[in-house]
Image (cartoon, coloured by chain):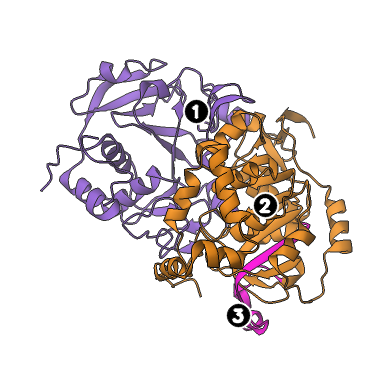
Amino acid sequence: MERTAASTDTERMICVAARQLEDRTTVFVGWGIPQVVALLAERLHAPHLTQIFEFGAIGPQSLTPFVRGTMGGASNVYRSLQWTTMNWAFSYAAAGYLDTGMIGALQVDAYGNVNSTLLGGTYERPGRRFPGSGGGNEVASLCWKTIVVLKHEPRRFVERLDFMTSPGYLTGPGAREAAGLPRGTGPYRVVTSKALFGFDAESKRMVLLGVQRGCAADQVIRGMGFAPLVAEKVETLEPPTAEELAILRQEIDPGRIIIGRPGE
Amino acid sequence: MNVLAAGTSAYHWTPPDAFREWVRAHKSRAAEEKLVSEQEAVARCVADGDYVAYDFSSLTRGPQALVREIIRQRRRHLWICAEFTLHETTLLVGAGCADRIDVGFLGYGDYIGRAVAEGRVRVCEWTNGALAYRMLAGARGIPFMPMRSLVGTDTFLRSGAKVVEDPFGGDPICLVPALHPDVFLVHVHQADVYGNARIFGTTLFALEAAIASKKVIVSTEEIVDPLEFRTDPAKTTIPHFLVSAVVHLPYGAYPGGVPGRYELDLEHVQRLNTLETDGQVQEYLDSFVFGVRSHAEFLERKVGWTRLADVMRRAAIKEGYR
């Protein structure tokens, strides 16, 4: 029996993110880690979660082990409620049917704006170019609540994004609505391997809500490119339970392709 | 309409009436036999400078055999609609076939990222949703489509979209220009010789793009009797009068998979994903694309029966795909 105390950064991040998803809701699932997060939530506390994939798979009951890479493969879209097209998948989001969306990020700023396009240089000559929006911009624009999942590296939390791919609260209160984005939407949580952030209702700036057991708030914040607000009572995030780890390691990702191995 | 903001990117656009007239003059509505070789389909339908779109992704039901044929025929200055595109942009750019890409999701791998950073290929920023809406506008025969995403971001500023005042409600609303690709490539489960086609499973915008495009090449795993469509018409994805050419290309999505038929070949996909240098890309192209004359020869000499049997065996889930 593996000691459950030894979990990887990625496992801690996935477990905290999965706990944010509520049963009997709809969730727009991005490629990669969000797929694993949604699967874990579905196997545990959210068996009636309806997942939506942007290419038109609605409500799949994805088979495990999770097949990485081919999001549209037969085992990932297994026993869906509906197979349709991208235009209809995004229509569900645009018309207000999607409770939560989950996306990854290269960089995030204090308003929860997300970069997944480039790092460094200029737009014309970027230091490094990445895939760009994909459907991330739609997810962040249209779902009622957006959850951003990224590894806890302080350099990813920046005052100014190298490129704003997908909208958080843009420049602050009222900015989303002024730009034409749907009213009442926006980033809800930012989940990292060390911490959980939310957003202040007034200023729309990021708030530290919780830290992993064993981490101190100031240690988590150190090195971030902006100073997040800190909740009056910072919650302690419990490490993955034996049950969560068993499902992750034995059912979802036995090859440890996404979750990694302790000590790595 | 009062334009409140505008992106700076170039965009491919055809006035709706010009497209209608093109359809009237060039897209035959007659049920006529269109079954040709991949060489002939590409020679006839894909020209230098064309805007090319495809469905679905590199790994799932992508028209990989047709893309390899386009490279073999050394088309130049193609403008690629990159929705869910992974390794084929590496091959198209590496072979000098494409120099402009509309980005929804642009591949992985360092090669294509560096090609963008070094300015060897120009990108126009969109989102997967924006490109799908653009295709939908093209299919509707209207000049643009309003949408709620894209706005407020750098992605918008680097796109060809505009924000206007909604003439009904007064709020800002984003408009994306209709897209009329010169060529749409789609790989399907079944087609008849006229071009009626069936896809089992999800599509990005197969019907929309087939309507919106000037030329449509359907490559198919199976050729079926035309009566198949009339006996189960709810399963028709694309009717024949949208289609320019039909090519019978079993395993046409390889090294990707076709749901219900064969799974992707992970080993071959990994080889593509790890192409980094120009030398590696050229070596791959020389061996797997230029080193063969046809898809059949590619399968015989570069893939082989053992591998094909393996990817077929792994596609054991059939429900929903028949």
Gap between marks 2 and 1, in whole Å? 39 Å
Q: Are marks 2 and 3 in contact (CB under 8 Å)?
A: no
Q: Secondary structure at mark 1?
A: loop
Amino acid type assigned to the residue bearing label 2 in the image = Ile
Which mark identifies residue A113?
Answer: 1
- The residue that label 3 is drawn on is B232
Residue B127: quadrant of the picture = top right
Where's residue B258, x and y in %? 51, 64
Amino acid type assigned to the residue bearing label 3 in the image = Asp
| Residue A6 visible here | yes
Q: Are marks 2 and 1 in contact (CB under 8 Å)?
A: no
Please give the name of the residue rendered at 68% of the width and 69% of the height, measured from the top-left corner: B247
Q: Residues within 10 Å of mark 2 (few under 14, many from 20)?
A: many
Is residue A182 a member of the stretch shown in magenta?
Answer: no
Where's residue B78, x and y in %? 72, 45
Which mark identifies residue B71?
Answer: 2
Chain B rendered in what hue? orange
Q: Given the image, what chain letter belongs to the residue carrying mark 1?
A: A
Amino acid type assigned to the residue bearing label 1 in the image = Asn
Q: Given the image, what chain letter belongs to the residue carrying mark 2?
A: B
Q: Residues within 10 Å of mark 3 (few under 14, many from 20)?
A: few
Q: Earlier in the sequence, mark 2 or mark 3?
A: 2
Chain in purple colour: A
- Vertical order, B196 against A68 (above or below): below
